[in-house]
Image (cartoon, rainbow, N blue to C red):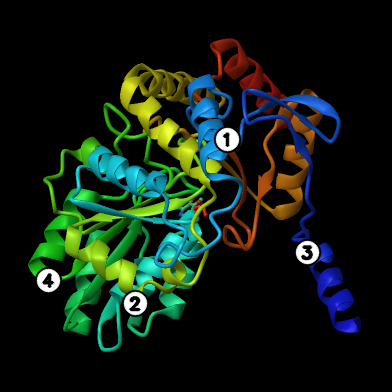
């Protein structure tokens, strides 16, 4: 017990101790936080679909038809027709032959990265990759080499130095805490030249990047099959729960037989699978929703530029880097007082001394919301 108290004390002294806040209400433009109505500017529900009637109905139908829990793993008793339908829908959405569903994006990355890079092979991983990729690397038996953030030149130099017999290049396609987009065309060239697999994490690209929200492959116009494994989550723009990896039929079959976070866990709950199906169908039918999000990105980037804050409208993630953990917490508190909810992001999510406010946009935000938030940020800074 002394150990826990001492560890917690040192976190508190460094302003790194975190507590849970209760967010009451569906993820929309406004929520109640700690009993106060505030504008939500930090959700990953980019398309604002959490209460979309057609999606809620799909979840309710799944619940009525299949009950509350799947009751078994996919390979034993838990594989309903809905799970298979969602895999077909996601493969069609991402333009691949196959898809494997996992119960979260986290387990998709942990399972796929560790399964695709076995003993004797290499993993080349961007230094700012999501923690779930990092954990997949730790579980893999391959040698892990970290390359400089979004730096294809450094990647190529490191591959040449290692002379790998085979393996994986893995990167977020949209970096979750910085909002920048990976240099995918260069990575495709390198992976071809070096005979490696390329895996991308589309958690923040699915439903967001590309004309119709299909992700970075659509954004860059990359050819079919140039990315071997396209991972994504069903918990962000798609307003449900679950993760997936899209790729060739053989790659998916291999993952179903080797990814331990696929094999040794219960299939996703029917209501979540129904909501995900409804979400993917909605996005396919409503490209104007993706376009509205893009319009909001351009508008908010302009607002930040007026404040002298560097902003890139390519994605709905706008980090305002403050630096010190204490200062960032104070800016976040001032914004909350003004009626805007943007929690401060700090170590271990980002490096020490790089604490930030991570503003995110939703398609549901209005120009008046963004004007208000920019004004509140000016005051808080
Ligand atoms: C959120 C996120 C994940 C994990 O997805 P969940 O479905 O929330 O488990 C994986 N990778 C990135 C880049 C993410 O931002």
The residue drawn where x is 52% and y is 45% is 270
Q: Nearer the viewer, mark 3 or mark 1?
A: 1
Q: Quadrant of residue 111?
A: bottom left
**Residue with the mark numbered 2:** 145
Which label number is shown at residue 359? Answer: 1
Going from the N terminus, do you reach mark 3 or mark 1 first?
3
- The vertical placement of 242 against 122, above or below, is above
Mark 2: few/some/many CA within 10 Å (<14, 14-19, 20+): some
**Residue with the mark numbered 3:** 14
Mark 4: few/some/many CA within 10 Å (<14, 14-19, 20+): some
Q: Quadrant of the N terminus?
A: bottom right
- The vertical placement of 286 against 60, above or below, is above
Question: Which residue occupies the foreground of this view, 34 or 302?
Answer: 34
- As measured in the structure, the alpha-carbon distance from the residue carrying label 3 to the one carrying label 4 is 44 Å
- As measured in the structure, the alpha-carbon distance from the residue carrying label 2 to the one carrying label 3 is 30 Å
Q: Quadrant of the C terminus?
A: top right
Mark 2–mark 4 CB contact (< 8 Å): no
Going from the N terminus, do you reach mark 2 or mark 4 first?
2
- The vertical placement of 190 against 5, above or below, is above
Going from the N terminus, do you reach mark 1 or mark 2 first?
2
The image shows residue 276 at horizontal and vertical percentages of 45, 39
Left or right side of 324 for 163: left
The residue drawn where x is 87% and y is 77% is 6
SS assignment at label 4 = helix
Which label number is shown at residue 194? Answer: 4
């Amino acid at each position: 017990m002394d150990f826990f108290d001492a560890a917690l004390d040192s976190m508190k002294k460094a302003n790194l101790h975190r507590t849970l806040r209760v967010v009451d209400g569906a993820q929309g433009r406004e929520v109640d936080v700690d009993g106060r109505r505030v504008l939500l500017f930090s959700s990953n529900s980019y398309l604002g679909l959490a209460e979309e009637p057609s999606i809620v109905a799909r979840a309710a139908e799944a619940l009525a038809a299949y009950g509350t829990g799947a009751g078994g793993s996919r390979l034993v008793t838990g594989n309903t027709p809905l799970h298979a339908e969602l895999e077909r829908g996601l493969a069609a959405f991402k333009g691949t032959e196959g898809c494997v569903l996992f119960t979260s994006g986290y387990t998709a990355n942990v399972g796929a990265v560790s399964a695709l890079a076995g003993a004797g092979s290499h993993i080349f991983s961007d230094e700012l990759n999501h923690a779930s990729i990092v954990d997949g690397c730790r579980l893999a038996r391959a040698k892990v080499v970290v390359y400089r953030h979004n730096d294809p030149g450094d990647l190529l130099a490191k591959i040449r130095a290692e002379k790998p017999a085979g393996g994986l290049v893995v990167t977020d396609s949209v970096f979750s805490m910085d909002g920048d987009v990976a240099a995918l065309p260069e990575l495709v060239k390198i992976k071809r030249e070096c005979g490696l697999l390329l895996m991308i994490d589309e958690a923040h690209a699915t439903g967001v990047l590309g004309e119709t929200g299909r992700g970075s492959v659509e954004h860059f116009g990359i050819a079919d099959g140039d990315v071997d494994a396209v991972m994504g989550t069903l918990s962000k723009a798609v307003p449900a729960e679950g993760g997936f990896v899209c790729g060739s039929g053989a790659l998916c079959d291999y993952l179903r037989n080797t990814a331990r976070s696929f094999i040794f866990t219960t299939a996703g709950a029917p209501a979540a699978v129904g909501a995900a199906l409804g979400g993917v169908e909605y996005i396919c039918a409503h490209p104007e929703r993706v376009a509205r999000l893009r319009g909001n990105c351009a508008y908010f980037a302009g607002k930040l530029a007026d404040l002298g804050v560097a902003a890139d409208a390519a994605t709905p993630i706008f980090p305002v880097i403050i630096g010190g953990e204490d200062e960032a917490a104070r800016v976040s508190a001032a914004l909350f007082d003004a009626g805007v909810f943007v929690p401060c992001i700090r170590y271990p999510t980002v490096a020490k001394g790089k604490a930030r406010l991570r503003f995110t946009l939703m398609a549901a935000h209005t120009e008046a919301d963004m004007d208000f938030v920019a004004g509140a940020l000016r005051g808080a800074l």
